[in-house]
Amino acid sequence: APMVKDAPSVLIRFQLTNESVLDLTDLVVVVSLIRTVEEDDTMTRSIVAGPVGIRITSVLQAGYSFNYEFRLRNISVDCGCVPRILVTHAREAVPTTQALMAN
């Protein structure tokens, strides 16, 4: 990613797809940037950035997806890091009375 105010940065992009048969809402996605170091047959992981929580209140319909991206400053792209993206919460979107009456 390009420099931001003379500081290195990385751009994290991901796509979240609703593979269920239910419409979902109130999703919470947690993103961290993880560095893995291997020494003497031991693997150590450390969090370089995050966790960053993203709350989505829109309805993500079954079979649909959304793309999301954000930039982290003061982290070099050559840090050897990988993003860890976890959906920690979601609930079924219940149709409103207005939506039911429209059908």
Image (tube, rainbow, N blue to C red):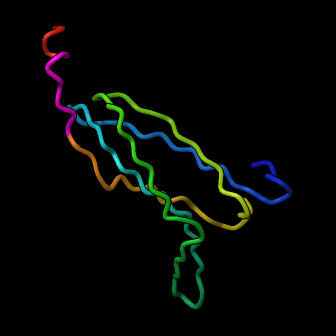
* Vertical arrangement, residue 11 with respect to residue 34, above or below: above
Direction top: furthest residue: 103
Direction right: furthest residue: 6
* Vertical arrangement, residue 100 with respect to residue 94, above or below: above
Q: How many marks?
A: 0
Left-right relation of 5 to 60: right
* Vertical arrangement, residue 21 with respect to residue 27, above or below: above
Q: Which residue occupies 60% across, 87% down?
A: 39
Direction bottom: furthest residue: 40
The C terminus lies in quadrant:
top left
**Residue 44 position within the rendered picture, expressed as x and y whole percent measured from the top left:** 52, 82
Residue placed most toward the observer, 47 or 57: 57
Direction front: furthest residue: 98
- Residue 33, picture quadrant: bottom right
Q: Which residue occupies 27% across, 46% down?
A: 90
Which region shows up in magenta? 92-98
Left-right relation of 50 to 66: right
Q: Which residue occupies 32% across, 56% down?
A: 88
- Residue 8, picture quadrant: bottom right
- Residue 62, picture quadrant: top left
**Residue 98 position within the rendered picture, expressed as x and y whole percent measured from the top left:** 18, 16
Say if the magenta span includes residue 52.
Answer: no
Left-right relation of 30 to 48: left
Q: Which residue occupies 53% across, 87% down?
A: 41
**Residue 58 position within the rendered picture, expressed as x and y whole percent measured from the top left:** 36, 33
**Residue 50 position within the rendered picture, expressed as x and y whole percent measured from the top left:** 53, 65
Left-right relation of 3 to 87: right
